[in-house]
Amino acid sequence: MYINGEWVNAKSGKTREIVNPYNQEVIAMAAEGNEQDARAAIQAARIAFDEGNWRTMPASARGELVYQIGQLIRRDLQELAELETWDTGKTVQESRDDMADIANVFLYFAGLADKDGGEVIQSPIPDSESKVVREPVGVCGQITPWNYPLLQAAWKIAPALAAGNTIVMKPSEITPLTTVKVFKLIEEAGIPKGVANLVLGAGASAGAELSVNRDVDLISFTGGIETGKTIMQAASHNVKKIALELGGKNPNIVFADADFETAVDQALNAVFFHAGQVCSAGARLLVEEGIHNEFVETLIERTKRIKLGNGFDENSQSGPLISAEHRTKVEQYVEIGKKEGATLAVGGQRPDDPELQNGFFYLPTIFTNCTNDMRIVQEEVFGPVLTVETFQTKEEAVKLANDTIYGLAGAVWTQDLDKAEFVAARLRLGTVWINDFHPYFAQAPWGGYKQSGIGRELGHEGMEEYTEVKHIYRNK
Ligand code: NAD
């Protein structure tokens, strides 16, 4: 762990085995921090914020340091990508793409650091002057999940530092490796001691301390909806600012006039990318009735050809699930889907390939004949499971798509752009893609409507989350 500019072990001396989900080999031992370690990190961040010069230094100088982190990530991109694949099992090509995006996130927020100079406003009181400025919030607790370990961390670290906050990051206890490596780069970049702190360990101890400790001014969390609720409650004790990026059950709407080939391939990519362990996975496919049968037949055919394997094998298209526990959860959902009367069209079991027996693999799975009242359609499986429903009109497609507690992302496929805009305007989602699935970038905000979250990451909105607004009035 990295606390107050020092690399330290857990005060308790405890460690945790970090396991490669491809073969269950132990690949590292990580410090297992707890509340005590979290408190030490919070204290370091508090002192660095209150007494250091991080928040008062010229914003352009802060931006330069954040820029430097991005450059170091580019320098070490291959090493970081390999660590991420060891830790998550995702293909190394996916990891490389993630790392390139992560470097861009640091460069983007570095550039934003000195762009908001505040504004002078017209005071209605004679002989007075008013200005409105943005300032850092203070000490930020940041908690991330295991599916995009470093990407989710970067979305939080880069804007928080660029805006002049100090941070305590706690990555998922299952996948800490790349975040540890990036803190080495943060040290190398010359970020002052105490400004950026890293605590490892379980959510219920190290993470819970971040959400309840009164010296933390803001808690930013990405993860499951139930954990999000717990953190929200804990944060309410001292009215912390909160930012939540939670789950999704994202609709992918295909009209009969869509480009058939692209829509099929992208429907597969939407849900099976990273074995479906993506908050924005297109897990609910809605297909217009006229093309439904042909579309589904083609999907099933192509699903059977998806090659599961070692993330380091460039021929692998998908890796394992993250853990035995998570695979069991996916299996339970498949059983629920069967009991509810959905038709299991393909998959629904572990692969029988002998080479994959030591990993947490699960075959890409499609349920057809689904209806919106089924749990398999409504609840986030977070695995390679697609449900298919059909619709007749654009109004019906919108109604089905919106009929969920989630509101993260979704897509619409049609060559009629008026129809696409009609649907996009009515979907209650933080991101709508037209004739594509999954693109995101540092310049555009990311976040959820409804129970998918509170607040936004990325874009200038992502920076504003890490600022307070102050009105300064002067009687001349
Ligand atoms: P999780 O909620 O189990 O854990 C996420 C993090 O919270 C981990 O670091 C964990 O240690 C910590 N945590 C657990 N209990 C805690 C507590 N009581 N107090 C404080 N921290 C605690 O989620 P996960 O299984 O790691 O990730 C999967 C979930 O993340 C999915 O629901 C997925 O949709 C969501 N996710 C959302 C986005 C998004 O952008 N909206 C992105 C990625 C993942």
Image: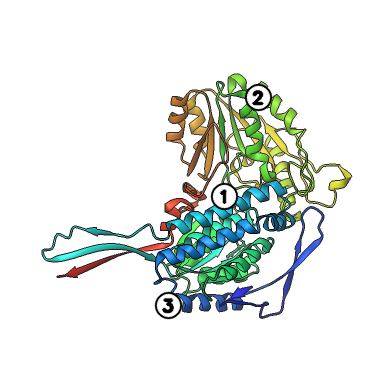
Location of the N terminus (image quadrant): bottom right
Callout 1 secondary element: loop
Q: Amino acid at mark 2?
A: Phe
Q: Earlier in the sequence, mark 1 or mark 2?
A: 1
- Mark 1 is surrounded, within 10 Å at the Cα level, by few (under 14), some (14 to 19) or many (20 or more) other residues, namely many
Distance between the alpha carbons at the discs numbered 1 and 2: 27 Å
Q: Amino acid at mark 3?
A: Asp
Q: Earlier in the sequence, mark 3 or mark 1?
A: 3
Query: Residue 381, which numbered label?
Result: none
Callout 3 secondary element: helix
Location of the C terminus (image quadrant): bottom left
Distance between the alpha carbons at the discs numbered 2 and 3: 59 Å
Q: Which residue is mark 3?
A: 50
Q: Amino acid at mark 1?
A: Gly
Q: Which residue is mark 1?
A: 247
Task: Choose top left, top right, bottom left or bottom right for residue 13.
Answer: bottom right
Task: Choose top left, top right, bottom left or bottom right for residue 12.
Answer: bottom right
- Between tags 3 and 1, which lies in front? 3
Q: For the point 42% across and 63% down, which residue is it?
A: 60
Query: Residue 295, which numbered label?
Result: 2
Q: For the point 57% across and 50% down, which residue is it?
A: 247
Pointer 1 residue Cβ closer than 8 Å to ligand 1: yes
Residue furthest left as drawn: 126
Where residue 279 sits in the image (x, y, percent)? 59, 48
Where residue 297 sits in the image (x, y, percent)? 71, 24
Q: For the point 85% across and 49% down, which residue is it?
A: 357
Q: For the point 68% across and 60% down, which residue is it?
A: 175
Do callouts 3 and 1 mark residues in contact (Cβ within 8 Å)?
A: no
